[in-house]
Amino acid sequence: MNTITTTTPSPFAKNDINLPVPIRPDICYIGRVSDRGVTKEYGILQDDRRRHMYILGKSGMGKSTLLENMILQDIYNGHGVCFIDPHGDSSHYILDHIPSWRTNDVVYFNPGDMEYPIGFNMLEAQRGEQAFG
């Protein structure tokens, strides 16, 4: 019988200070399963993550922790991430755990920051190399 023992993957548990690189970069680890005394981490293939995901749960059940862990794994594996955090708690946690070799890749945009505003018009049409598709 399979028993899910945790939904927080050990490589990125909240109490870890030094977050190691995941064992396989083609898998996003999401938890552990115990079967007949053997505990293994399990996850989702990166190819499968490119499809839609829907995370459900009551408050305090680990949805934000799951997202934080998935995002940190992506960052450690050299992938780009865009994360919209309506509350700010998760974005601060993620920023605190960015590895030193990725700090120059980070762009933090806080639309509510009136001291350092960033202005851009998302509807302004660009031509040539400046356009994004």
Image: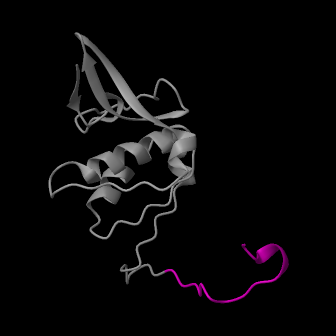
- Residue 19 at what x, y percent from top left? 37, 32
Nearest the camera: 31 or 80? Answer: 31
Q: Is residue 83 left or right of residue 78?
A: left
Look at the image and give the residue range highlighted in magenta. 118-133
Q: Quadrant of the N terminus?
A: top left
Q: Quadrant of residue 6?
A: top left
Q: Is 52 drawn above or below residue 71 in the view shown?
A: below
Question: Among all residues in the image, which is located at the extreme front?
Answer: 1
Q: Residue 15 is drawn in which quadrant? A: top left
Q: What number of labels is visible?
A: 0
Most foreground residue, 112 or 36: 36
Residue 24 image offset from top left, x and y in percent:
51, 26
Queried whether the magenta region covers residue 126, the answer comes back as: yes
Where in the figure is residue 40, as x and y percent of width and height? Answer: 33, 19
Q: Is residue 29 left or right of residue 27?
A: left
Residue 96 shows in the view: no
Residue, x 25% and y 19% (percent of image)?
A: 34
| Residue 48, x across and y down, in percent | 53, 43
On screen, residue 127 above or below 88? below
Outermost top residue: 37
Colouring scheme, one of rainbow, by chain, secondary structure, one colour: one colour
Asked if one can make out residue 103 in the rendered structure from this viewpoint, the answer is: yes
Residue beneath the point at 35% across and 66% down: 85
Look at the image and tell me in which quarter the C terminus lies. Answer: bottom right
Residue at image position (52%, 62%) is: 107
Left or right: residue 81 versus residue 61 is right
- Magenta segment: does it hold 89? no
Q: Main secondary structure of the magenta part?
A: loop
Q: Is 61 or 91 nearer to us in this picture?
A: 61
Which residue is most to the right?
Answer: 128
